[in-house]
Amino acid sequence: MKTDLHIHTNQSDGSLKVEEILQISSLKGMDIVAITDHETTSSVTKAQNIALDYGIRIIPGLELNTYYKNHEIHLLGYYRDINNDYLQAKLEQIRKERTAVTKLMLGKLKDLGLMLEWQEIKNTASYEGVVSKSHIIYTIWNKTERDQNLTINWDNLASCLRPGGTAYIPYEGNPFPDAVDLIFETGGLPVLAHPGLIVDQSLTKDLLSYKPIGIEVYYGYWVQREEKIAYFEELSRKYKTLSTGGSDYHGFFSPVEIGEVPVPEKCVLDLMEYLQID
């Protein structure tokens, strides 16, 4: 059973349409995929409507940016059914708040001499999706593709936009405990996303201790992948959590392809049993 439980489309910060995601997934022989866009589930419904054409099952999902002790923490949520009015209202609120933060980050980049207009950034995002720092990067990429004389120091740009960078502004409007509660209250399973990317690893045990959430054990880390996966396998056993895994595929910027991260079949079956998916 080939599975990828962490994929983004262009409805959040991915670069490909949901149809393109399913085409790639089909070519790679995937059996089950989860669409986990940031703060939106619009691609999930579309994926469910066309997935049978590709012979693929869809597990509804999402990913939330959360905040805990001055750190940005990502939280996945998996569902049997995402048609929940309260959930959708909260997602809309978070999208608006995160978009406002991105606009402030653009202002900081302008102060550093990078000339971009907000409308250019918005044009790269979906109509209802959050506008994130990824869309700033996409906009600059598109400009360099059109103008070969325009050069960008991508390492410097990435440094400016990452936590602690000169243009970075954290989104503090979605505290981690509140996000966990939201997913549980709306019928989902919260899963700590890519824990090996958390800057302060001492926080991981705090995060897993709040409530019985899952952990994304299997992830395409760029360095020390095997060691990190082994560590989080052991942590999952210790805390008796459900485990998930996936590529975190975003499209043309992704170093890890759909299906590249092996996810044990037991993880998928346990998740489906928890969600009561037949």
Image (cartoon, rainbow, N blue to C red):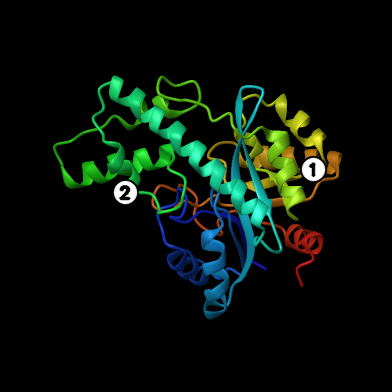
Q: Nearer the viewer, mark 1 or mark 2?
A: 2
Residue drawn where x is 22% and y is 42% of the image: 143
- Under mark 1, the amino acid is Ser
Question: Between residues 37 and 83, which one lies in front from this camera angle?
Answer: 83
Q: How many marks?
A: 2
The residue where tag 1 is placed is 236
Q: 10 Å neighbourhood of mark 1: few (<14), some, or many (≥20)?
A: some
Question: Between residues 111 and 154, which one lies in front from this camera angle?
Answer: 111
The residue where tag 2 is placed is 123
158 sits left or right of 36 in the view: left
- Under mark 2, the amino acid is Asn
Calculate the distance from the C-alpha at mark 1 to the C-alpha at mark 2: 41 Å
> What x and y, as percent, mark residue 40?
54, 53
| Image height of 180 relative to 68, above or below | below
| Of the image marks 1 and 2, the number of the one nearer the N terminus | 2
- Tell me the quadrant of the picture where the N terminus can be found: bottom right
Q: Secondary structure at mark 2?
A: helix
Is residue 245 something that shows in the picture? no
Point out the residue furthest to the bottom here.
Answer: 53
- Tell me the quadrant of the picture where the C terminus can be found: bottom right
Q: Secondary structure at mark 1?
A: helix
